Amino acid sequence: MSLQVVEKLSGKSWLLTGGNGFLGSVLIEQMLRTLNPSKIVLVILPKTGVPALKQVEKLLARPLYDTVRQQYGSTAEIMKRFEVIERDLSSKEDLILPAVDIVVHVAASISFNNHIHEAIAANFKATQMVSAAAAKMPNLEAFVHISTCYVNGNQPRGTHLAEKILPLEHEGKPISYQALVEELMGLTHEEAEERAAYYRRLWHYPNNYALTKRLAEHVLLDRYKEGLPLKIVRPSIIGGSSLQHLQPGYIGNAAGSTAFALGIAFGMYSCTLFKPEHITDLIPVDYVSSAIIVAAASEVHKDAEQPLIFQAATSAVDPMTNEQCYAAVTRKEAEMPPRFKVFHGYPKPDMREIYCRTPKEYRSALRRANYSIKMKCLGLKLAGQGEVARNIATRWRVFKVVSGQEMDFNLFFSAPNAAQAFASLSPEEQKLFPCVWVKGRDNWDTYLASYMDEVWRFYVVKTGIAKPRRGTKRAAPGSPKKAVGAHKAPALCCASSEAVRTKDD
């Protein structure tokens, strides 16, 4: 049975939370370009000194929207379709939303370091409030929730995971998510984090983000059973836009995989427990936005026990290794090396040179590197380069969170629902809404090269901290490499006046 997305969704009214973030910005552009929405209601986090409408105008001024501005004539004409609500969804105030045809809940806290109270407020309570408000809309056709593949990231390494909500249980006994949340929110700040750490160990979750996103899916499952027209889209790790996109390699911020690439480029990633042969599940951002739109248009059997779930992932169809991802960054770094390096002699051309074979080796390398970072930041501060020191310290904290063994998931996320929906589209709509990675059409080497070009263009070249290395020679395939032995602490390079810049969404 064919699915006609444009015919079904054209002229509809939409409400988006988190619409001015990376994924949201790509989704809004795609909606405006392909679906002619009658209204887009954006629920935006208030920013001191920046009115909500100004935030939207700034968003629409990006080069990403060049085609849309030409299509509609001007930014002012596009703005007529927007209604903006300033609201912190983690607040405890009652939420009342205007009625629309389709709600897309993107907003979440993606920080892995948030205290459990903050993570529950941003990822569980906000989902609870938005879904409750949406359930009261008289003509709601779809509620699309953006979750993450890593709600099931606690499963054994190497597992192939279906598009299902797994039961929340311990030793075969069901666990009440409501009771769990009430318990954690009723504890003091310190007690709650200790208790959350216990539950993370119990269920093998690496952070509060994945745990609270898992709890949010369970509150939505109850809403679905009450009649909410729920669809769930679970992205893996979102990367820059694909070669199919109007702006290949587009990145909206320096988070996630982009932060990982910058950490390698600037010589910060000097040790890791990630196995080079394990899987990095990366998905282009425009494939995720397409999955959201196709999910909103898809029909669901009303007697289904679970909602329609799209896993926007690549690991089950065309797996990419950690080593492939690392090599794409080091190739670009060899072509155009940053002048600023945190550790002298990094990145190493081969990921196996920074791979620590045991946790003990990793902890030892991390301690030495941590001391070097502290000394470097102190030197920079004394030299009047506090901003550089703060950037390094921030990046280092992120690195320590994401480089450990618990984040090397090596899971395979099956995506038959998304593949089936894509196959039901016409050839024209498959080009408009490429919601799955297609091996053969898509290629990791060309995609990653395009992605790294954009990372360098925005975060390295624009900051003036890189220039092309002329006459760079790369080692021929099969040439001898330095033996990988015990990991040594990296030496420090000289201080630089150039900061590693981050971009606010």
Image (spheres, helix red, strand yellow):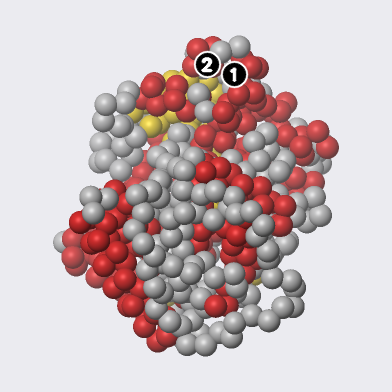
Q: Which mark is residue 107?
A: none
Q: Mark 2 vs mark 1: which is more N-terminal?
A: 1
SS for callout 2: helix
SS for callout 1: helix
Q: Nearer the viewer, residue 60 or 503?
A: 503
Q: Nearer the viewer, residue 192 or 395?
A: 395
Q: Which residue is mark 1?
A: 69
Q: Nearer the viewer, residue 15 or 76?
A: 76
Say if mark 2 contacts mark 1, CB within 8 Å.
yes
- Please tell me which residue is depicted at 67% across the width and 57% down the height of the picture: 471
- Quadrant in the picture for the C terminus: top left
- Please tell me which residue is depicted at 73% across the width and 61% down the height of the picture: 317
Tally of marks: 2
- Please tell me which residue is depicted at 65% across the width and 17% down the height of the picture: 71
Hey, what amino acid is under mark 1? Answer: Arg
- Please tell me which residue is depicted at 69% across the width and 70% down the height of the picture: 475
Residue 361 is situated, as x and y percent measured from the top left of the image, at 42, 85
Residue 293 is situated, as x and y percent measured from the top left of the image, at 63, 37
Q: Which residue is mark 2?
A: 75
Vertical placement of 19 versus 163: above or below? above
Q: CA distance from mark 2 to mark 1?
A: 6 Å
Residue 7 is situated, as x and y percent measured from the top left of the image, at 72, 26
Hey, what amino acid is under mark 2? Answer: Thr
Assess disc 2: are there few (<14), some (14-19) or many (≥20) residues with their C-alpha within 10 Å of its C-alpha: some
